[in-house]
Image (spheres, rainbow, N blue to C red):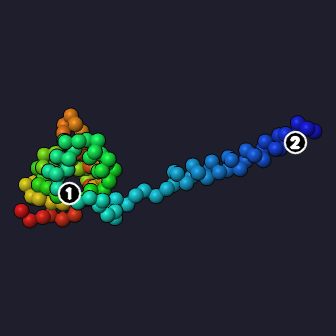
Amino acid sequence: MKQRLTYWAIARLLLPVAVMGFLLVIYIFYKPHPQWNQMEPAYEINAVDLLSAYRSDIVKANSKYLNQVLSITGEVTSIETNLIIIDHGVVCILDSTEIINEQSAVGKRLTLKGRCVGYDDLLEEVRMDHGFILLPTVK
């Protein structure tokens, strides 16, 4: 009889813990994704200034810009299928909903919004993802 009471006591303790763990897992897996196109940029910066900040002090620039939504203005130097390179050093992967005309955009200034994911010191490039084209700027 004593052994039976011990099993029920353990079951009464473990059942709520298991239910809370299950609910926590469900909450984490079904949490909505961030809407990158609706987020306001934390910083508005020129591409050249961003590159110089990373080249001078990576740790300080990472503490300020890493995983932040940035609005970057600069001249488009290269375009690939879903990738824009600005001022030979800011590489931005566009969101899948963005469409850009490759021939007309190279050499023009534009403003992009995206999340900064870091600096590649080997290629000396600032990497961004979830990019959206805000507006072309006049030269």
Which residue is drawn at the image coordinates 83% and 40% (left, top)?
7
Instruction: Give the side of residue 61 with respect to residue 139, left or right.
Output: right
Q: Are marks 2 and 1 in contact (CB under 8 Å)?
A: no
Instruction: Give the side of residue 53 with respect to residue 17, left or right.
Output: left
Which residue is drawn at the image coordinates 19% and 42% (left, top)?
56
Question: Which amino acid type is shown beneath numbered disc 1?
Answer: Ile
Nearer to the camera, 36 or 104: 36
Q: Position of residue 57 (x, y in %)?
A: 23, 42
Say the numbered circle drawn on residue 31. Answer: none
Residue position marked by numbered label 2 in the rendering? 5
Secondary element under disc 1, as helix, strand or loop, is strand
Quarter of the rendering occupied by the C terminus: bottom left
Q: Callout 1 environment at 10 Å: few (<14), some (14 to 19), or many (20+)?
A: some
User: Most extreme residue toward the top, as rendered?
Assistant: 122
Which residue is drawn at the image coordinates 78% and 47% (left, top)?
12
Q: Is there any visible trace of residue 34 in the rendered image? A: yes
Secondary element under disc 2, as helix, strand or loop, is helix
Q: Is there any visible trace of residue 96 in the rendered image? A: no
Q: Is residue 88 above or below residue 103?
A: above
Label 2 or label 1, whichever comes before in sequence order: 2
Which residue is drawn at the image coordinates 40% and 58% (left, top)?
34
Residue position marked by numbered label 1 in the rendering? 45
Q: Callout 2 environment at 10 Å: few (<14), some (14 to 19), or many (20+)?
A: few
Instruction: Give the side of residue 61 with respect to residue 18, left or right.
Output: left
